[in-house]
């Protein structure tokens, strides 16, 4: 079973029975306009914001997270990178490499099914094996970032024996 790690705090599975993760790119970007109106994209920096929320039968123990220092945030919801025509994709170095969290690949077939496909790596570049009839390929990985973690919010319902929590993490 996959678990979320925030620094040295592991969120118990029974605290994250219902878990959602959203990824949002933050960045210094704008579209500038020429005198003729043509758009020119300018991007100066880019960082990831991860919002993790969940609920479960026991409290998550988020009080153990030191929000005054940067934390390593290891996520459990995968992100996909689409392969180019050479069946390759470059993955970011900010990904989980611990046991059970290795990247994997999918072949996308015309009937809308996806089949797990062998993938090999040379550094951060993954190359998938071709599958007959496939119309596309993706390599999936679990993000792992160094981030500032906002003070977590949590709530509980004694009558329902349910606890709810949320963390917002911004990559440094």
Image (cartoon, helix red, strand yellow):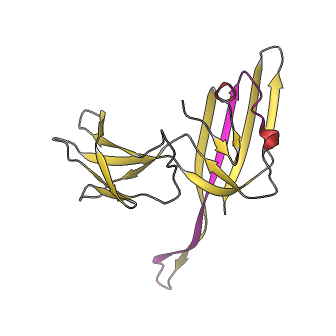
Q: Residue furthest front?
A: 99
In reply to whether residue 45 is colored magenta, the answer given is yes
In reply to whether residue 171 is colored magenta, the answer given is no
Question: Where 159 sits versus 36, above or below?
Answer: above
Question: Where 126 sits versus 156, above or below?
Answer: below
Tell me the quarter of the picture where residue 102 sits. top left
Q: What is the quadrant of the C terminus in the image?
A: bottom right
Tell me the quarter of the picture where residue 135 sits. top left
Q: Main secondary structure of the magenta part?
A: strand
Tell me the quarter of the picture where residue 88 sits. bottom left
In the image, is 166 to the left or to the right of 140? right
**Picture residue at 55% right of the left edge, 34% below the top:** 2
Residue 78 at x, y percent in the picture: 49, 43
In the image, is 128 to the left or to the right of 132? right
Question: Of residues 110 and 6, which is closer to you in this image?
Answer: 6
Residue range (magenta): 36-61
Residue 83 at x, y percent in the picture: 32, 54
**Picture residue at 58% right of the left edge, 44% below the top:** 75
Residue 26 at x, y percent in the picture: 62, 61
- How many marks are shown on the rendered structure? 0
**Picture residue at 59% right of the left edge, 45% below the top:** 22
**Picture residue at 20% right of the left edge, 47% below the top:** 130
Residue 171 at x, y percent in the picture: 64, 59
Q: Residue furthest top?
A: 159
Q: What is the quadrant of the N terminus in the image?
A: top right
């Amino acid at each position: 079973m996959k678990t979320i790690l925030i620094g040295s705090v592991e969120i118990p599975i029974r605290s994250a029975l219902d878990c959602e993760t959203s990824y949002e790119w933050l960045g210094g970007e704008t579209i500038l306009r020429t005198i003729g109106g043509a758009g020119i994209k300018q991007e100066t920096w880019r960082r990831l914001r991860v919002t993790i929320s969940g609920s479960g039968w026991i409290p998550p123990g988020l009080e153990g997270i030191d929000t005054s220092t940067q934390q390593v945030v290891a996520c459990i919801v995968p992100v996909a990178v689409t392969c180019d025509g050479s069946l390759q994709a470059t993955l970011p170095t900010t990904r989980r490499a611990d046991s059970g969290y290795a990247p994997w690949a999918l072949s996308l077939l015309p009937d809308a099914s996806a089949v797990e496909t062998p993938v090999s790596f040379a550094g951060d570049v993954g190359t998938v094996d071709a599958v007959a009839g496939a119309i596309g390929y993706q390599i999936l990985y679990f993000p792992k970032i160094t981030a500032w973690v906002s003070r977590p919010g949590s709530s509980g319902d004694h009558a329902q024996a349910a606890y709810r929590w949320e963390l917002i993490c911004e990559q440094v």
